[in-house]
Amino acid sequence: MHLAVYLPLFFPLLAGPAARPLADRLEPRLATWVLTTASVVLAAGSTTVLGLLALAGLVRIPRIARLADLSPAVLGRDDPAWVSVAVPAAVLLLAVTVVASRFLVRRVRAVCAAVLESACFPGQDPLVVMEESAADAFAMPGLPGRIVVSTGMLATLDETERAILFAHERAHLRAHHYLFAAAAQLAATANPLVRPLAAQVSYTVERWADEAAASTTGDRRRVAVTVGKAALATKRSGGLRRLPAAALGLLGRRGAERRTDGERTGLDKAGPVPRRVAALLSPVPTGGKWRAAVTAAYLTAAVLCTFEAAQDLHEVLERARGG
């Protein structure tokens, strides 16, 4: 097997430096698609390669080779050092499988719980008001999806700001933003190197909803004020004690503000809420399409390298079967 089998393990190294520029300079909807796709492709590629490395070592065990009707002599002659590579690859693959499976089970349970809880609210009105002094609001996936807002949040906002809040949450439900976030988080669980991409997806889905609210109300500055006002109210009141794991709110997922991509301090590396406010006070990004094109080319190269690695192993096995 050739060098191509190792390359997909290194492609995710650029995820950290590329994540923030893509999130800030692409239109939010495009940024969400690009970042989510990148995280999934890079994580899938590296995981596939771990599987190929483990399999390449496994078939070189004489007993297994004979069971598979393969020639141990041909396999050993092809690359006798592969067993030493396969052992750590198999260990990593096992760890990835366990961790990713646990995350996937938890996420499916969370979505099912949110859907069930959403269905338990009376009536078909998507708006649910909770008698709670803490200021908070979030969207819950379901049939129908619900917009849950506390009386504390409603008391904080005026009529126009409430309309902005509802438009923001409707955008989360309409575009199924929780699926983007879950896919990126699953990829980050499988490969920690893509965590910066997943962190930015949590940001861009909020930007996507912000722009949807701005498009509905026609006042970007007022949306920025509403985001800032809601953030202060939630911080002062502490927010709701328990949010559904699948919920997305005006302030994003709790804990998403943690710095997972080596962010520095200062205005240039501000947290999600200040970044969203600043973005709303600036024109919507319309350029940066070349960044999306470069990213697409990069991901295509990663996919081709993964395919080449699989094809290479297939050829080795064919030679061993013929020998």
Image (cartoon, rainbow, N blue to C red):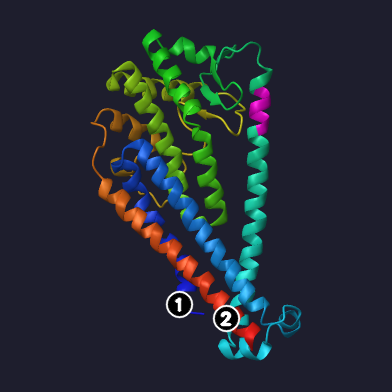
- Label 1 Cα crowd, 10 Å radius (few <14 / some 14-19 / many 20+): few
Q: Are marks 2 and 1 in contact (CB under 8 Å)?
A: no
SS state under label 1: helix
Residue that numbered label 2 is attached to:
316
**Residue 125 image position (x, y, % from top left):** 57, 12
Of residues 321 and 230, the one nearer the viewer is: 321
Which amino acid lies under the numbered mark 2 shown in the image of this protein?
Answer: Val
What residue range appears in magenta? 112-117
* Residue 259 can be seen in this image: no
* Residue 62 can be seen in this image: yes
Q: Quadrant of the C terminus?
A: bottom right
Task: Name the mark nearer the viewer: 2 or 1.
Answer: 2
Of residues 309 and 150, the one nearer the viewer is: 309
- Above or below, 164 against 267 in this view is above
SS state under label 2: helix
**Numbered badge on residue 3:** 1
Mark before the other along the chain sequence, 2 or 1: 1
